[in-house]
Image: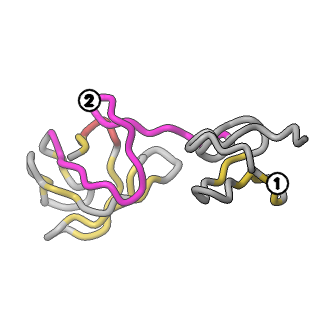
């Protein structure tokens, strides 16, 4: 028989290889053949102020008044930011804040909704 591992999501033994991925034909789950189930290799994990893992498209709430550099504007506590995008760099989150525009935020100043 095959020496491929069963699907980590549904347990099906009918997995097959497609390039560097393993695929389950029953539940359509795809994962890396290098043994890391789900996720990308070497992906950075970004967590909010409470320790919850953030992902692209999440909605977060600002937990501290934040001054906007180069402006007299302030992002107030409780401001909801929808559809965030995780990035590498000194700021973890790229987003659009209502009334201010595009901005970079650090994950330590937000909480996941």
| Residue 64, percent from left and from top | 14, 40
| Residue 107, percent from left and from top | 34, 41
- Residue farthest along the right direction in this orientation: 1
The secondary element bearing badge 1 is classed as: strand
Residue at 74% across, 35% down: 35
Q: Is residue 7 left or right of residue 99?
A: right
| Residue 52, percent from left and from top | 33, 34
- Residue farthest along the top direction in this orientation: 51
- Judge whether residue 31 is colored magenta: no
Q: Which residue is mark 2?
A: 50
Residue at 25% across, 55% down: 59
Q: Is residue 27 left or right of residue 42?
A: left
For label 2, the crowd category at 10 Å Cα-Cα, with few meaning under 14, some 14 to 19 and many 20 or more, is few
Give the residues drawn in magenta, as a range. 42-63
- Judge whether residue 59 is colored magenta: yes
By secondary structure, the bulk of the magenta-drawn segment is best described as loop
The secondary element bearing badge 2 is classed as: loop
For label 1, the crowd category at 10 Å Cα-Cα, with few meaning under 14, some 14 to 19 and many 20 or more, is some
Residue at 66% across, 43% down: 7
């Amino acid at each position: 028989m095959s020496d491929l591992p069963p699907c980590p999501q549904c347990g099906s033994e009918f997995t097959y290889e497609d390039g560097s991925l393993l695929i389950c034909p029953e539940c359509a789950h795809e994962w890396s053949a290098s043994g890391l189930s789900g996720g990308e290799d070497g992906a950075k994990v970004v967590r909010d102020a409470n320790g919850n893992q953030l992902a692209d498209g999440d909605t977060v709430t600002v937990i501290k008044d934040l001054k906007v550099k180069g402006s007299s504007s302030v992002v107030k506590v409780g401001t909801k930011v929808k559809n965030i995008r995780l990035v590498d760099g000194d700021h973890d989150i790229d987003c659009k804040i209502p009334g201010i525009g595009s901005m970079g935020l650090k994950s330590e100043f937000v909480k996941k909704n």
